[in-house]
Image (spheres, rainbow, N blue to C red):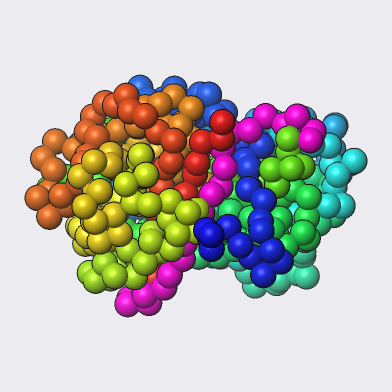
């Protein structure tokens, strides 16, 4: 008996991904993002953050345009768009797109659709957005509803709604929670994912922490995961949302199925506020638990989308965790970091990288790690440098290791 298929409520149904919505530096649809990932296109560019910049030239992966979604089909207020700040718009666009892509209508199913939104430091971003527009919200706070409830109202969702804050793993925790809600029978569908935005405070803070790359010559060359010359990550913005449903519900209504969220593993090491633990044990545990949850053996993993942001300590620690978790199967499993193209979407990173796993499954090709000119011998993995690699992918694992020790691995499986 496969114990991973049991829950306290009995055998569980598979959790399927039936809708995808995106607003990212590499595109705003599954097809566009997949094309750009497999074509090895970088979205990193020069960004202007104004007087708070710590350097003359700052790189980032921005979202260039945020188009208003068609809110006329939703039971919420179509005029709500004009009242939203940039961060809220970044969230609403992929949420609305995921719902539309799933074919679910909020009017019919809204009371049984949940929402889990991955976002760290929400109030800080709200205060900053308002302050930069000349507001005084940080000094004269109102009792405004949390953004997750504002999003639920606009989308017409009546199910449970929460925000998951786990730093760089926030969106992954959102997927995990939505899956649990479905398994418990609390919802019939759940909108899950995460987003983030480039902000002056965020860029300045990460720069001061020495987490960002100091390169200022060529934007496309700045993010260098697993490379000996890496010196930090490049921040990106935007994110991805999915609609999750139980297999029976999805198949009964004839939904399009992108894949199965087959396994989740989590751990915490809490070794430091921002520096990853050099001990790979806890990160490896998250991967091992995810595989066990999915009922997958290490030699059945066809691709690993690494967290690998391009930090000197973090990439080595993750390579060790992957080898510890996969054991003798490691050398046969292609590993890449799509942050080299998208930048680090922080709260939205795990959702974007789950989409990259779906790309690998749908196209039977592994997205590459750009700028991997000189692989670090301390990161001995089956790297995919520079260009995509054709490869059979039925099972993909995606790692997300958040600041403070929030370790998470998702297993995405092909659905026949």
Q: Residue at x 25, y 48 (%)?
A: 329
Asked whether residue 273 is drawn in magenta, I would say yes
Is 69 rendered above or below residue 264? above
Relative horizontal placement of residue 153, taking residue 387 as reference (left or right):
right
Relative horizontal placement of residue 207, taking residue 346 as reference (left or right):
left
x and y, in percent, of residue 39 in the image? 35, 22
Asked whether residue 387 is drawn in magenta, I would say no
Relative horizontal placement of residue 201, taking residue 189 as reference (left or right):
left
Number of disc labels = 0
x and y, in percent, of residue 283 in the image? 34, 65
Q: Residue at x 32, y 24 (%)?
A: 390
Q: Residue furthest front?
A: 1
> Residue 58, can we see it?
no
Q: Residue at x 43, y 41 (%)?
A: 395
Is 231 rendered above or below residue 165? above
For the C terminus, the image quarter is top right
Q: Residue at x 67, y 70 (%)?
A: 8
x and y, in percent, of residue 408 in the image? 44, 60
> Residue 182, can we see it?
yes
Relative horizontal placement of residue 254, taking residue 230 as reference (left or right):
right
Judging depth in this view, the residue of 215 and 352 nearest the camera is 352
Is 355 rendered above or below residue 265? above
Judging depth in this view, the residue of 306 and 206 nearest the camera is 306
Residue 392: quadrant of the picture? top left
x and y, in percent, of residue 21 in the image? 62, 36
Judging depth in this view, the residue of 334 and 55 nearest the camera is 334
**Which residue range is magenta in the image?**
252-274
Q: Residue furthest bottom?
A: 271
């Amino acid at each position: 008996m496969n114990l991973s298929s049991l829950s306290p409520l009995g055998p569980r149904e598979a959790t399927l991904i039936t809708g995808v919505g995106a607003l990212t530096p590499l595109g705003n649809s599954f097809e566009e993002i997949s094309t750009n990932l497999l074509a090895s296109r970088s979205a990193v560019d020069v960004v202007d953050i104004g007087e708070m910049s710590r350097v003359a030239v700052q790189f980032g992966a921005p979202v260039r345009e945020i188009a208003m979604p068609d809110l006329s089909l939703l039971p919420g207020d179509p005029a709500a768009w004009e009242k939203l700040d940039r961060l809220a718009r970044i969230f609403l666009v992929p949420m609305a797109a995921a719902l539309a892509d799933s074919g679910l209508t909020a009017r019919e199913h809204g009371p049984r659709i949940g929402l889990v939104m991955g976002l760290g430091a929400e109030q800080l971003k709200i205060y900053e957005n308002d302050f930069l527009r000349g507001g005084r919200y940080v000094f004269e706070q109102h009792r405004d509803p949390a953004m997750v409830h504002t999003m639920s109202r606009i989308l017409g969702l009546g199910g449970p709604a929460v925000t998951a804050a786990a730093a760089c793993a926030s969106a992954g925790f959102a997927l995990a929670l939505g899956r649990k809600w479905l398994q418990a029978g609390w919802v019939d569908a759940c909108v899950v994912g995460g987003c983030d935005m480039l902000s002056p405070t965020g860029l300045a803070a990460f720069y001061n922490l020495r987490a960002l790359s100091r390169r200022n010559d060529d934007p496309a060359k700045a993010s260098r995961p697993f490379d000996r010359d890496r010196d930090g990550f490049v921040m990106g913005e935007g994110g991805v949302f999915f609609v999750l449903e139980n297999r029976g519900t999805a198949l009964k209504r004839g939904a399009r199925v992108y894949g199965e969220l087959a396994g989740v593993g989590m751990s915490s090491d809490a070794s430091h506020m921002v520096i990853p633990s050099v001990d790979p044990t806890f990160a490896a545990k998250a991967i091992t638990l995810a595989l066990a949850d999915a009922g997958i053996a290490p030699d059945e993993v066809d691709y690993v989308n690494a967290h690998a942001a391009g930090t000197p300590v973090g990439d080595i620690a993750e390579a060790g965790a992957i080898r510890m978790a996969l054991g003798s199967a490691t050398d046969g499993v292609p590993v890449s970091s799509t942050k080299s193209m998208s930048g680090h979407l922080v709260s939205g990173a795990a959702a974007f990288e789950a989409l990259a796993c779906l790309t690998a499954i749908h196209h039977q090709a592994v997205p590459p790690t750009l700028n991997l000119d000189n692989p670090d011998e301390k990161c001995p993995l089956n790297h995919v440098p520079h260009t995509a690699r054709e490869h059979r992918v039925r099972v993909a694992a995606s790692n997300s290791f958040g600041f403070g020790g929030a370790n998470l691995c998702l297993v995405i499986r092909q659905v026949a």
